[in-house]
Image (cartoon, helix red, strand yellow):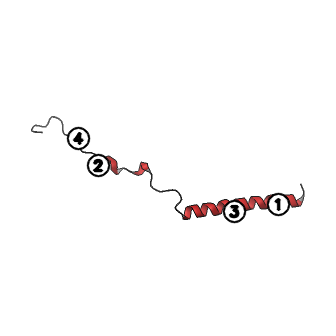
Amino acid sequence: MRLEQKNRRSCILLLAALAVLIGVVIWMALGGVSSQSLGDDVKADFQAPAPRPVGRPGG
């Protein structure tokens, strides 16, 4: 492989890696992955009414 082709290929790979890095930095600056997900919503479990006690007189 000629030296010019090797340099061109290395330059293209370097530019592609740099573009990916810049993209990740911009994506993270704009919010990235949300820290809250549907699995984090545990308050929904505590809002259900409590069950009535069983076998309690007068209830």
**From the viewer's perspective, is 39 left or right of 52?**
right
Mark 1 Cα-neighbour bin, 10 Å: few <14, some 14–19, many ≥20: few
Q: Residue beneath label 3, please? A: 18
What residue appears at the point 86 percent right and 58 percent down from the top-left corner?
5
Q: Residue beneath label 1, please? A: 8
Q: Residues under labels 2 and 4: Cα distance?
A: 12 Å
Q: Which mark is residue 47?
A: 2
What residue appears at the point 66 percent right and 59 percent down from the top-left corner?
20
Mark 3 Cα-neighbour bin, 10 Å: few <14, some 14–19, many ≥20: few
Residue type, mark 4 in image: Pro
**From the viewer's perspective, is 25 left or right of 31?**
right
Q: Which mark is residue 51?
A: 4
Residue type, mark 3 in image: Leu
Residue type, mark 1 in image: Arg
Viewer-side label of 4, 1: 1
Q: Residues under labels 3 and 2: Cα distance?
A: 49 Å
Q: Quadrant of the N terminus?
A: bottom right
Residue type, mark 2 in image: Gln
Circles 2 and 1 in contact, beta carbons < 8 Å: no
Q: Quadrant of the C terminus?
A: top left
Between disc 1 and disc 3, whose residue precedes? 1
Secondary element at tag 1: helix
Q: Residues under labels 1 and 3: Cα distance?
A: 15 Å
Residue 35 x/y as whole percent: 47, 56
Residue 14: image quadrant is: bottom right
What residue appears at the point 38 percent right and 51 percent down from the top-left corner?
41
